[in-house]
Amino acid sequence: MDDRITPPELYFNRRQIMRGALVGSALATAGLYRWFNPVSIPMAETAKLDGIEPSSLSESEQRARGFALDEPWTPEMSVVTYNNFYEFTTNKERVATEAMHFSTADWSLEVGGLVERPQTFNLEQLRSISPLEERVYRMRCVEAWSMVIPWIGYPVSRLLELVRPTSEAKYVAFETLHDPERMPGQRTGVLQWPYVEGLRLDEAMHPLAILAVGLYGKELPPQDGAPIRLVVPWKYGFKGIKSIVKITLTAMEPPTSWNRQGPREYGFYANVNPSVDHPRWSQATEQRIGEAGRRPTLMFNGYEDQVADLYQGMDLRANF
Ligand code: MTE
């Protein structure tokens, strides 16, 4: 855990400090503190994203495909101030500030491995690979909190189709930037760096798996994984690797950061499953950020109709 002193940039007014003293510690752990006590946190400003295409599907069709939800969106303030991004800090409420000067101006993403046309994309190219769409997804963290987030992005399949995976390609490996100068958390040994993640190729090609370049109609802020991150809504949030610089098509299942860290606690598949507990806590319910009380966690995070076919014949209890 992060035990550094609260930085002077975090300005709380007196009333907030008094209220905070009463309820702060209990609510902070559930991420509700920020919701009840909106404070001014220094963080990067993000620009509106151009080129978001309205969906050609009806609202009911979007819901049937899992692209839209009839659940309230999590307040944007919570989404951008309550983050997991260990490259900056393990303190969720400090990531936005620690990452505020992280520049993505000269970004490039290399896509290669078992593909016919390896390519490196700059940021402008990445944002124009495919029309940008809004996808409103549940996000369920393995720590048992959840959010509803309006992402802006496009299916991972659009990028993979450009590089043409060969017939030997069975998996997709993702890698975050490794730059301890710009990501100070990488000077610690809290995880093995760089952060890596992976999907089976058919999972990556599923229409629900997206590369997000924005949220709430704006560019992705640094704390949420700028300039491009993975979103796989039926899996625990740690599969959603942030600030991706490399994608490699492979024949073998690639290593993944949290599995490497705790092989008995975090699996490669990490499909949301309320009946498979984490060894240290139950996964049956979750705390939706901004809500009082807990909700039941849904199988595949509520995307069972769309994704269950991917796992036919697999023992789901073993794929934690
Ligand atoms: N990606 C990188 N590179 N580093 C991280 O620490 N944390 C993961 C995931 N992606 C993480 C990451 C975890 S545990 C979660 S729950 C989500 O990002 C959180 O995404 P959010 O902060 O945008 O809500």
Image (cartoon, rainbow, N blue to C red):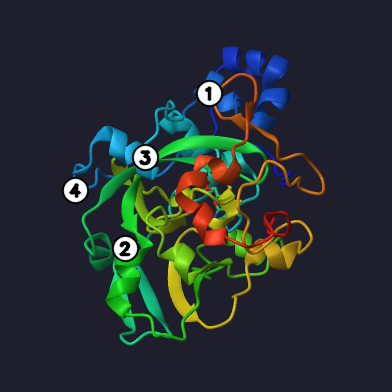
- Does the beta carbon of the residue at mark 2 sit less than 8 Å from ligand 1? no
Q: CA distance from mark 2 to mark 4?
A: 17 Å
Q: Secondary structure at mark 3?
A: helix
Q: Earlier in the sequence, mark 4 or mark 3?
A: 4
Distance between mark 2 and mark 1 Cα atoms: 31 Å
Q: Secondary structure at mark 1?
A: helix
- Amino acid under disc 4: Asp
- Closest to the camera, between mark 4 and mark 3, is 3
Q: Nearer the viewer, residue 40 or 50?
A: 50
- Residue 307: give x, y in percent of width and height: 49, 53
Which residue is the site of mark 2?
105
Identify the residue shown where x is 58% and y is 81%. Answer: 252
Of 46 and 209, the residue lying toward us: 209
163 relative to 246 in the view: left or right: left
The Cα–Cα distance between marks 3 and 2, rounded to whole angstroms, is 37 Å
Disc marking residue 261 = none
* Chain-order first, disc 4 or disc 1: 1
Relative image position of residue 187 (x, y in whole percent): 65, 65
Label for residue 50? 4
Quote the CA–CA distance across marks 4 and 1: 29 Å
Indicate left or right for 291 with 224 as reference. Answer: right
Q: Secondary structure at mark 2?
A: loop
The residue that mark 1 highlights is 35
Relative to the observer, which residue lies in front, 284 or 128?
Answer: 284
> Which of the 4 image quarters holds residue 87?
bottom right
Q: Position of residue 135 (x, y in %)?
A: 35, 44
Between circles 2 and 1, the one closer to the viewer is 1
| In this view, 60 is above or below 47 | above
Residue 151 position, x and y percent, is: 37, 44
Camera-near label (1 vs 3) is: 3
> Going by the picture, which residue comes out furthest to the right?
280
Can residue 187 be seen? Answer: yes
